[in-house]
Amino acid sequence: MSRVESLTALVKAFDLSLSPATIGKALVKAEIMRDMTYLSTTGSGKEKFFKEIMPAYMEYGINRTTMHEFKTEPRFYIDRFPDLVVKVLEQLTKEAGDMYE
């Protein structure tokens, strides 16, 4: 597989009109990624959030571990990113169609 990058880096590299946040939200709605939670490590008890790639879609990237073993950061394969953008566009097209129902 190719090198992995963040959504932010890939959006910039491919000069896309979509924001990383929009892509991330569409990937969650398409069930390619999921929102995860954990309690803050500062002891505040505050719930924190992160996203991870679902196991069935690991061909698009990896969940890179952070300094906290319970939290990951999604990173996407550069050579598979165009295919992932197609999935995002399919999700957005579905949402647009649902607006007419």
Image (spheres, grey):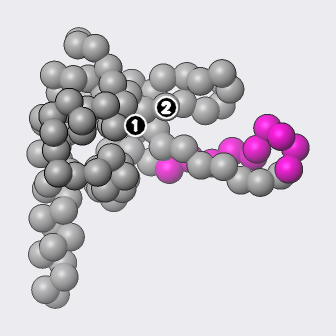
Q: Which numbered disc covers residue 82?
A: none
Quadrant of the rendering where the N terminus is positioned: top left
Residue appearing at x 50%, y 50% in the figure:
35
Residue appearing at x 19%, y 82% in the figure:
99
Where are the magenta residues, as a range? Answer: 35-44
Badge 2: few (under 14), some or many (20 or more) residues near its Cα, within 10 Å?
some
Contact, mark 1 vs mark 2 (Cβ under 8 Å)? no
Q: State how far apart marks 1 and 2 are (Cα).
A: 9 Å
Q: Which secondary structure lies at badge 2?
A: strand
Residue 89 or residue 98, whichever sits in front: 89
| Disc with the residue nearer the chain's start (1 vs 2) | 1
Residue 73 at what x, y percent from top left? 49, 31
Which of the two marks, 1 or 2, is nearer to us in this view?
2
Determine which quarter of the picture holds residue 9. Answer: top left
| Vertical side of 32 occupied by 97: above or below | below
Residue 41 at what x, y percent from top left? 79, 38
Residue appearing at x 13%, y 56% in the figure:
90
Quadrant of the rendering where the C terminus is positioned: bottom left
**Identity, as a three-letter code, of the amino acid under mark 1:** Ile
**Identity, as a three-letter code, of the amino acid under mark 2:** Glu
Residue 30 at what x, y percent from top left? 29, 54
Q: Which residue is mark 2?
A: 73
Q: Which secondary structure lies at badge 1?
A: strand
**Left or right relative to 59: residue 69:** right
Determine which quarter of the picture holds residue 8. Answer: top left
- The answer, for residue 27, to whether it is visible in the render is no
Q: Which residue is mark 1?
A: 53
